[in-house]
Image (spheres, rainbow, N blue to C red):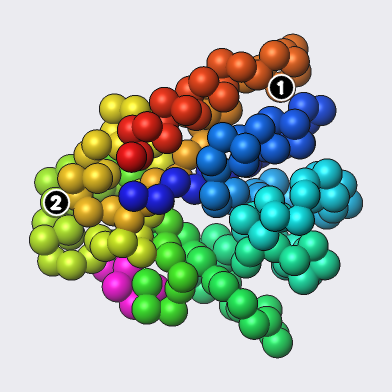
Amino acid sequence: MKLAVMTHSTFFVEEDKILTTLFNEGMENLHLYKREASPIYSERLLSLLNEENRKRTIVHDNFYLKNEFELGGIHLDTIDTPIPEGYKGKVSRTCGDLSLLKDIVKVSKYVFLSNFLLPKQEKSDTKTYSLDLLEKAAKSGYINKNVYAMGNINLETIPVAKALGFGGVVLCEDLWSRFDIQNQTDYRDLIHHFQKIKRAIG
């Protein structure tokens, strides 16, 4: 099973140090995702990573960064986002609709299936999938090595994703909740938790 790590949604002072440490601890796939942030901050962060680690980094917007920093590829956050004209390279995607998953996988390096085991929120339009439905999808061949579970990923749900046949998981909130970006400088708890996740992935 593969592990992809999504960046914190905002930039912060210790970020490059933490990411470098995570790479040193075995992180192989980083997704740079900063909602509506100025690209200049992404440029600065990428400039602080070494060449090898940049090749393991996937960008979710400002796709010119892929060539400028020789990144590993681009990620499209919606199924109808077009590939940039003239782009040649790896493309991954996010899909929130099980019925479309098979078709999306065919045209992607891998696909994040969003909202994995998220609790159902009242008055929410967000699609959530019960374990029963995910089991049926797995038996029907929708879930395979090219589909990563994204959503409620933690030490308790990783074995569930494994059993369902997901090829990977996407780690985000469960990791970054271990570090207060405004008040902390010591990130050992975050790194220790990442090590636990890595062992759970196997």
Left/right of residue 146 with respect to residue 184 in the rendered view: left
- In the structure shown, which secondary structural element does the residue marked by tag 1 occupy? loop
Count of picture labels: 2
**Which circle's residue, 1 or 2, is located before the other in the chain?**
2
Q: Observer-nearest residue: 186 or 175?
A: 186
| Amino acid tagged 2 | Glu
Are there few (<14), some (14-19), or many (20+) residues within 10 Å of tag 2?
A: some
Query: Which residue is painted at 81% across and 28% down in the image?
Result: 13
| Residues shaded magenta | 99-104
The image shows residue 18 at horizontal and vertical percentages of 69, 31
Magenta residues: mostly which secondary structure? helix
Residue 37 x %, y %:
78, 47
* 117 lies left or right of 72: left
Q: Amino acid at mark 1?
A: Ile
Query: 62 above or below 86?
Result: above
Can you tell which mark lies on residue 181? Answer: 1
**How far is the residue under mark 1 from the one under mark 2?**
37 Å
Label 1 Cα neighbours within 10 Å, binned few <14 / some 14-19 / many ≥20 = some
